[in-house]
Image (spheres, rainbow, N blue to C red):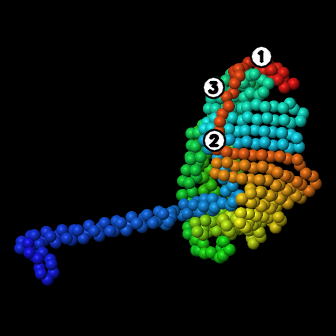
Amino acid sequence: MKFDPMTGEPIYENPAEAVLAQHKKTTGQKNLIVIAAVAVVALVVLIGVVTGLFQSKQMKILSAVAKTFTDESKLAKACGALDLIGTDAYTLYVKADVEGQEVEATLAAKKNEMQLSGMVDVSGMPEIQGIIGLDSKAVRATVDGLDTVLVYKFTEENDGELMDQTDEEVIELINETLVMLTSDKAQNNVGKKVSSAVLKVFNDWKIEKVDKKSFEVDGKKRNCTGYTFTIDENGMEDMSDAIVKALDGEVSDEVLDAFEDLMSDVVDGMEDTEVTVYIYKDMLAAVLLEIGSDEVEILFEGGEYRTQNVIVETEGYTVMELAGSTSGSVEEYELELAGREVLSMEYNEKSGELSIKEKYTGANISIDATLIGKSNELSFVLEDMDMDDYSISCDLEINLKKGASMQKIKGEEFDLGAADEDDLEDLVEDIEDAFY
């Protein structure tokens, strides 16, 4: 092979070799172009996914709602440990003393097992201390002074005197409720199935983009992106039917029937509602509702967080206003309804001091407390409560923390579901002897 001294290109003596070399060169260039094109498309798709460029209108609205209400105040963040309720393991302790009437209780929950232990000391009644335990098969209860452990085995066939004297539908509802309370799978399934059903129906609703509109957010006028859709009777019927279908087999027929009746009362004859949602920086700026001839505006004016200042107006008249401000570690809030101050609140994140004043009822209730929250624990102590006319002696302590330990309930078991009439009479005598 020789090379052209001017161009450096190879000189082929065989014409076939020249054609083959040109084909390889052209194919290589095309391959490079194809690879580059694929890379560019992949980059655009990646940017679209990350930035939300390719989100559906439905997902943009749902995402904005979620981000708006997770953009939290200091007080809400301090209460974040409330999310522990419903997790695999948590312990809730409550102690209250109101004018000498005392109640102390501890609820421990661990996966599909729960225990409630505590003490009740109320005037006119003997002091009671005891424990109630619930697992996936039975409820067990015992009180101090009684050697017997009362047991109800809700997963078994029960044919005792109590069962004969109780309505069959009531027993069935109790049993199904207890099964649901102690079944992780059942609880998880219900939430997932209902959420999926609602989202599927919502995705079928027609949503259109509207012209941008200016709203005040964080102290300045902002141009906000808008989307509009209509909620009508047919759409709500579809939503109700989807939820009922999702709940079928997960809850009792009585609960399902009650839900259907409720939705039927709400949906039948409802007026069309036009909803327009305006979004700024991926959070709600305003929600405008047209319900028949009535117009309602919900304005999220923001501040330190998007829901710090919220105004609800109808026909230019302010029906509700939440006004908040932040100074260092201190947050202040005021709530007005129809121009009348209802509630004021102040919270200090550092000290945990919480002050609440109610002004709507005329009693002018004032509460001073301490609330300290961490990721795995929440502590609330009520220190003082006053009213205009009189003061109530009230001590309240609440503690919620991650993790739980279960006590062993000991004693001779008394099967409530299988007991006959004579057994029940003997039990009543034992209880009377223990307390009186």
- Seen from the viewer's position, the closer of residues 234 and 138 is 138
Task: Tell me the amino acid under the disc marked 2.
Answer: Gly
Residue at image point 35% right, 66% down: 39
User: What is the residue that sits farthest to the front in this orientation?
Assistant: 351
Q: Which mark is residue 156?
A: 3
First of labels 2, 1 by sequence position: 2
Closer mark to the observer between disc 2 and disc 1: 2
User: What is the residue that sits farthest to the bottom in this orientation?
Assistant: 6
Name the quarter where the N terminus is drawn: bottom left
Q: Where residue 336 sits: x, y (%)?
A: 79, 64
Residue at image point 37% right, 68% down: 40
Identify the residue under disc 1: 422
Check the image and report above or below for 148 versus 272.
above
Name the quarter where the C terminus is drawn: top right
Q: Where residue 382 sits: x, y (%)?
A: 80, 50
First of labels 3, 2 by sequence position: 3
Q: In the picture provided, is 111 more to the left or to the right than 422? A: left
Q: Crowding at label 2, few (<14), some or many (≥20) Cα neighbours within 10 Å?
A: some
Query: Helix, strand or loop at disc 1?
Result: helix
Closer mark to the observer between disc 3 and disc 2: 2
Task: Tell me the amino acid under the disc marked 1.
Answer: Asp
Q: In the picture provided, is 92 more to the left or to the right than 67? A: right
Q: Is residue 84 visible?
A: yes
Q: Which mark is residue 403?
A: 2
Residue at image point 93% right, 54% down: 389
Residue at image point 88% right, 54% down: 386
- Seen from the viewer's position, the closer of residues 247 and 373 is 373
Q: Crowding at label 1, few (<14), some or many (≥20) Cα neighbours within 10 Å?
A: few
Q: Give the spatial CA distance, label 3 vs label 2.
A: 30 Å
Q: Give the spatial CA distance, label 1 vs label 3.
A: 22 Å
Q: Where residue 322 sits: x, y (%)?
A: 75, 65
